[in-house]
Amino acid sequence: MSTYHTLIDAPALIARLADRLPTVLLDCRFDLLRPEAGAAAYLAAHLPGAVYAHLDSDLSGPKNGRNGRHPLPDRAAFAARAGAWGIAPGVQVVAYDGEGGPFAARAWWLLRWLGHEAVAVLDGGRAAWRAAGGTFEAGPVRPAAQPPYPLAPKEAMPTIDADALLARLGRVRLLDARSEERFRGEFEPLDPVAGRIPGATLRSFSDNLQPDGCFKPAATLRSDFERLGTPPAQVVHQCGSGVTACHNLLAMAHAGLEGSALYPGSWSEWCADPARPIALG
């Protein structure tokens, strides 16, 4: 029985479900400008047996105005949520969204952060599932709940906070997963301040994808990231709120380049403190 740690394609998932292999499906569709649109789309049609993972209420913790738009959840609270979804050690989890994987990658990273390694993103998302002949069902799903996921003594994926990042600016490779317009500070639809963290390098999450919404081959991704000339342990990922940055982390992991860190607060936390420096242009 194969275990998937980064990506799984639609035919492999169809075969896995046909063989009734233990699998938890997480539908992570979300719209940052219409927060309830993903849940409505899930109820209308989702992969068979999938449960819905809401970015704001399931894949993020409480906001306090200074910790960004999508702060990390409390680990114990997220462990309880994972158990409620039916996730137990060794059970394969597959997360998906509409296409491209920006929100599914957040679920992937959070589960890896808990210490769960059998988690992958459906390559190409719902669109790839449909193209492969996969079926859909409507309505809510009641998963077979498990106890809270057993917590490892420490986080299994590295993170860095704002103060530590400020102290290390210029000594780490900071990759920004946002669009070029937001990176340059020309357009900011979500946060009150436009701009970027000084020294950041643009690596939009869309650069990981082919035109069909599937990830580029692992060898291509590896070449892309190795051209930066920075070992993974010296790379920090950020975006607007710590969500699409996980897409770059997933792409690096799929390319065999593990060990880089996430700045969870990202730009939305960074710009909340006017004492922190910003760059434009």
Image (tube, rainbow, N blue to C red):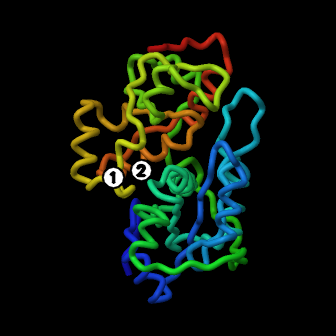
Q: Secondary structure at mark 1?
A: loop
Between the residue at mark 1 and the residue at mark 2, the CA separation in whole angstroms equals 18 Å
Q: Residue at x 37, y 36 (%)?
A: 233
Residue type at mark 2? Leu
Q: Check disc 1 and give the amino acid type.
A: Pro
Q: Is 267 situated above or below 32?
A: above
Residue 129 position (above or below residue 215): below
User: Which residue: 50% across, 46% down?
Assistant: 157
Q: Quadrant of the N terminus?
A: bottom left
- Name the residue carrying label 1: 211
Above or below 84: residue 14: below
The answer to which of 89 and 275 lies nearer the viewer is 275
Q: Residue at x 57, y 27 (%)?
A: 267
Position in image of residue 185 (x %, y %)? 51, 20
Find residue 94 and report its horizontal and vertical position in percent.
Answer: 50, 67
Instruction: Identify the mark at residue 250; answer none if there is no mark.
Output: 2
How crowded pointer 1 is (Cα within 10 Å; few <14, some 14-19, many 20+) is rated as few
Relative height, residue 197 to residue 126 (above, below): above
Circle 2: is it few (<14), some (14-19), or many (20+) Cα within 10 Å? Answer: many
Q: Is residue 185 left or right of residue 64?
A: left
On the image, the x and y values in percent for residue 170 come to 40, 16
For the C terminus, the image quarter is top left
